[in-house]
Amino acid sequence: MNVSRIALAGGVAASTVLLLAGTASAHVSVQPQGEAAKGGYATVNFKVPNERDDASTVKLEVNFPTDHPLASVSPQPVAGWKIDVTKSKLAKPLDVHGRKITEAVSKVTWTAEGDGIEAGYFQQFPLSVGQLPEDADQLVFKALQTYSNKEVVRWIEEPVEGGEEPESPAPVLALTAPAADAHGATAADGKSGHAEKAEETTASSAAASSSGTDSTARVLGIVGIVTGVAGVAFGVLAGRRRNV
């Protein structure tokens, strides 16, 4: 009987940890390595989890926004995947560093040359992109995920500000404030490019430290809850022994 109570308490504690830890949203998403600053260039990763137990992911198609076309898109090779870059003519040419750009990447497709992404795994697909728009806060990329059983999942629903997350949300890249000019002094304060670079490095270090602190706090919080649940269970058992 005592063993059953202890097992029950342990089960409650384990369930609490799983509930608090949660699971990552299982959909195609995009995140920058560092920041994606307006007007600049960034390296981004498209993260693709496999959600099927009986099929693997064998293709990913990412469509680029037409309202804010990107003149420069360079994929990083991914072992076991073939990459195709599709370009389209622009209705209105882009002016990039004094050059007129008449076409831009409209789609990038990754096709597995082997088994692809198997059940229980995910894959990241890196891209270098730019020049990011200065008049937008985010970029929406519509993606199609194809499984080995021919099923196609369309991650194309655009999020609505203040609304609930769509059932099949499109990957959204959040853009941050424009970065300072790293090539020379700024007009406002005359800081050199070296000083600005040092400030960026310091900010990155601080952000990394903050992220580490947040992760540590979450772990300690979960450990504290588990310890508390175990303590309550122990107290109940001890009280029953004294009553006997």
Image: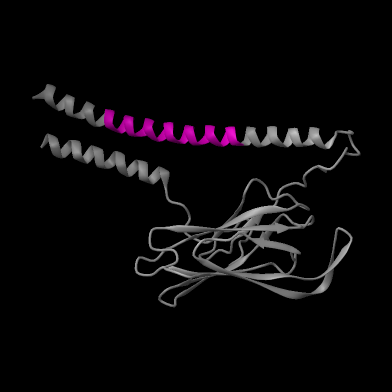
Q: In this view, does 216 lie above or below 21?
A: above
Quadrant of the rendered structure where residue 203 is?
top right
Looking at the image, the residue that sits furthest to the top is 242
Looking at the image, the residue that sits furthest to the bottom is 150
Relative image position of residue 178 (x, y in whole percent): 77, 47
- Verify whether residue 215 appears in magenta: yes
Give the residue drawn at x 55%, y 63%. 169
Give the residue drawn at x 32%, y 30%. 227
In this picture, residue 188 sits left or right of residue 216: right
Dominant SS of magenta comes to helix
Looking at the image, the residue that sits furthest to the right is 187
Q: Which colour scheme is used?
A: one colour
Quadrant of the rendered structure where residue 56 is?
bottom left
In this picture, residue 77 sits left or right of residue 233: right
Residue interval drawn in magenta: 208-231
Relative image position of residue 123 (x, y in whole percent): 49, 58
In this picture, residue 21 sits left or right of residue 33: left
Q: In this view, does 205 lie above or below 45?
A: above
